[in-house]
Amino acid sequence: MYLHPLTSSLPQFERDDLKKVVEVRSYKRSQYLLASGQRSQSIFCVATGLLRVALHGQGNQEEVTTDFIRPDEFFLPPSLRNDEFESPATVIAALPTVVYAIPLRHVRLLCARYPDLLIGLMEHESRRIGILRTQLRRVTTSSVEKLVSRVLHELTQLAPSENGGYDKRITQALIASYAGISREMVNKTMKDMEHRGLVTKDDQGVHVPPSFASTDFGGLLPAEPDLTRKEAPPVDPGFEIDFLKKAPKD
């Protein structure tokens, strides 16, 4: 049975109490969870699907996608000092998504009682900051083709399709937003890649070669950990939340 690492060490009574306050929410593709500046009393953990985090430029500039949140990852506030926070960014469902909304007040109480939980959340945010730094370096130093190819490979990890590749519902506009280049440039680059046989499409997704995972140093990126579930969690309000269940001992 699935067990989220950050709840594995909690006593059963704490897990039972947490189960009572967690709310399961479903979002359609492109539906907003939070707008920038909106106040929230909950943090979010992705159960299925994919969220994207976006910032808006000044004036009439379009939003820029800064990062993605995939299953088992969290959208956390800038600080855990209060029971409510103002969202520093807009959070949108990049694909149909189910999230666990967890009251921040309850999380803060658990962190005070169980430091390992707080450390786990800090490690999660540290990882996200590392991803943001990598993407910033990629945007500022890579050629357009190299940048697009790396983003396409990253999408195979973030939004995998059933037969490999990435979910075809990820639009070129979203790729452009994340890559920091124009949609026209993404379209031109991907068409050129298709013409050269590097990018192929089918009914399920868009497929790219393993070489798109190459780093700036000529090697291949290490394989991403498999964070997918063997069974997707149900979304009926009356179900028992998999997020809180204990895994059987080996």
Image (cartoon, grey):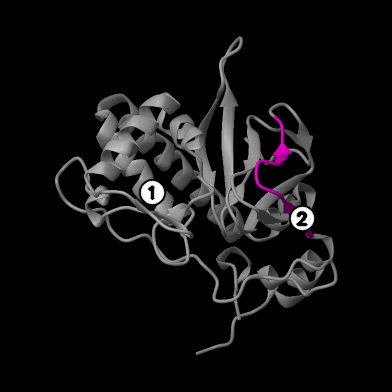
Name the mark on residue 183.
none
Look at the image and say whether residue 85 sits in the magenta stretch: no
- Residue 77 visible, this angle: no
Residue 64 place in picture, x, y as percent = 52, 27
Choose top left, top right, bottom left or bottom right for residue 120: bottom right
Q: Give the total number of marks visible in the rendering.
A: 2
Look at the image and say whether residue 25 sits in the magenta stretch: yes
In the drawing, does residue 220 fall left or right of residue 3?
Answer: left
The chief SS type of the magenta part is strand
Q: Nearer the viewer, residue 171 or 71?
A: 171
Disc 1: which residue: 154
Kindly indicate whether the residue at mark 2 contacts the one at mark 1 (C-beta within 8 angstroms): no
Bounds of the magenta segment:
23-35
- Identify the mark nearer the N-term, 1 or 2: 2
Three-letter code for the amino acid on which mark 2 is drawn = Arg
Classify mark 1: residues with Cα within 10 Å, few (<14), some (14-19) or many (20+). Answer: some
Residue 196 place in picture, x, y as percent = 21, 44
Disc 2: which residue: 25
Establish if 64 lies above or below 223. Answer: above
At a point 43% along the width and 36% down the height, the residue shown is: 132
Three-letter code for the amino acid on which mark 1 is drawn = Glu
